[in-house]
Amino acid sequence: MAVRYGFRRFGDDDDFNDLDVDEMLRLLADDYMESGDLDDAMDRLLREGFTTESGERVEGLRELLERTRARRRELEQQGDPSGEMARYRDWLEEIEAVENAELDALLEEAEASGDERRAEVTRDLVDQRRMQQDLMSERFAERVGQYQNYEFVSSEAREEFESMVGELERDVLNTYFEQSKEFLGSPDPEEMARLRDMMDALSTMIEQDRAGEPLDPTFDSFMEKFGDYFPGAESLEDVIRQMAERAAAAEAMFNSLSAEQQSELRSLFDQMMQNMEINFSMNRLVSNLRMATPELDWNRAHRTRGQGSGSFADATDVAESLGQLRDLEDFLGRSSAAQSLPEVDLDAVRRHLGDDAARHVARLQKAMQALKDQGFIDRHSRRLELTAKGVRQIGQLALRDLFAQLRTTPTLGQHREATIARGGDREETSKPWEPGEAFALHLPKTLRNAVLRQGPGTPVRLIADDFEVEEYEAARRSATVFAIDLSLSMAMRGNLVPAKKMVLALTQLIRSKFPRDFVAVVGFGERAMELKLEDVPSLTIDYNYGTNLQHALALSRHLLRNERGDRQVVVVTDGEPTAHLTATGEPFFSWPPVRETLEKTMAEVLRCTKANITINTFALDIERSQFPFVEQIAKVNGGRLFYTDVDELGAYALNDFVRHRRAG
């Protein structure tokens, strides 16, 4: 049978206050910037799960799949209906033994009485009963039916047989009406009549709905009369689904048996339903349910390996759970499982795998939904995309990480706080006053601090702790182009992702703190190209060979041509120039680099220098003796050169940018 997957509203009891969406975005961004495919990155994150900063493990779909398989294997050891058949068969044999013992005792007593007439009558009675037993079928279901027309001699055997038949009838009812076990535990004739009425009314509604006719009875009147059979149902579809899933589970329970056992069990069920006079109504309803739910697997079978016995209803419970676990297992094994994560029914997960597993799924669902709700990711044309807001947020997170790295890495120097540069443009920010500072008082915030401190009323008395002073942006304007090496070696050495994070962080800093500044991004491999900031996270390497720094500097100079103030190109590379553009505009590559490549690159360095454009180079994993050309760039241009490893790239770049942007 099939399990339903439906969207579920998160309730008040879903406590995910500790869920950090920024943490999810950071984890997603790291993988995304490595692969360049947001769908793949999201899929891996949701499949693998994650560990929060507090050390808590949130299991992914892969672990959920393993839980599902383990639970299925556990259930396969339970609920074997053939064991229950054997129990009933043994029970009937015990009843027969009690009856036969009573027959033997009755005959023995009659013969010992000395009354020949009594002995003869008793002998005829015993022979008749034994002949009835001998003529009974070997098939259990038929034998039970024949015993129902048998007049027991033993009152004990008769009572035990009635008890067995009563248990069988309840078991049959509970097999198909699992939700109604409480009031079908001891069904009386009135309740059985009501059950037949319910099945007939439901069949009529399904047939009318299939024919497009008005429902009679209406769904509301049906639920008013029979709603206790279907707790939680809000529509005809809900009622049909509840009944169909249970009936399909019963079919799976039958199908799990051998052909001979299955035939015997079906005969037994038919016999019990005939006893209860619901056989016709039940067969009609199951037939309608099959037609109404063609999407369910009505032919599913589960090869259980259980030991011992349990009720047929219990075996159906196991079959229903196995069916849902199979569907969940198939769902989680699909390549699109992560994309379909919101469709997983948390109630089904909780029911089969426990509260802990459901909580992990709920956290993944809520994290994914929060990324969408907060506008960080969106789906277009079946592809997941990072929004402009998402790119900015990744930059902000990267910037936060770099500042944290500066604070914990003394060798990089301390970040200098903003200085007050009178004569500049006032920022929309303020900060607490520090003794000894010259200041321009931010009056509204200062008064607010005083009122919050002393409470309402006048006069408002100010103390030094209330003072907030205006911050000023330095009047100097800057223009920056980040030039990122996209050659094959950058990715092979693991340098590309840190370079992208550095660019996102510094670009976010510039746009948020220095909105008047100009900033652009250039990527260069065989050729150079201008990049949109939104494209930076998905940047992949240039599989064409070449590190065309000449073209990158030329394009950067072109982008800076109309900008005023301090102009700089920040180059991030892991090697010397190995490509240049020829006179026809075609790229030329050579390793080791030829003289012409170095000369053309240096000519572009000279043009930048003449145009007062500073070239600051961050050389990753470069031995000074191996690639001296980057030092020549610094000497000719006067820019700064940093030899750094990839782990310190962002912090070095941030530290240098802040120091020189705020200097003066």
Image (tube, rainbow, N blue to C red):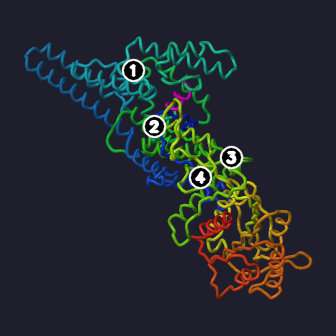
Q: Amino acid at mark 1?
A: Leu
| Mark positioned earlier in the residue sequence (1 or 2) | 1
Q: Give the residue drawn at x 60%, y 18%.
A: 205
Q: Which residue is tagged 2?
A: 253
**Closer to the camera in the image, 180 or 115:** 180
| Mark positioned earlier in the residue sequence (3 or 4) | 4
Check disc 4 and report its element: helix, strand or loop: helix
Please indicate, yes or no, whether residue 391 appears anywhere in the rendered image.
no
**Closer to the camera in the image, 394 or 194:** 394
Q: Which residue is tagged 3?
A: 378
Which residues fall within the magenta stretch? 239-247
Q: CA distance from mark 1 to mark 2?
A: 21 Å
Residue 184 tag number: 1
From the top left corner, tell me how far across and down residue 624 is, in percent: 64, 85
| Mark positioned earlier in the residue sequence (3 or 2) | 2
For the residues carrying marks 3 and 2, which lies nearer the camera in this image? 3
Disc 2 crowd, CA 10 A, few/some/many (<14, 14-19, 20+): many
Q: Which residue is tagged 4?
A: 25
From the top left corner, tell me how far across and down residue 111 is, in percent: 11, 20
Q: CA distance from mark 4 to mark 2?
A: 46 Å
Q: CA distance from mark 3 to mark 2?
A: 44 Å
Check disc 2 and report its element: helix, strand or loop: helix
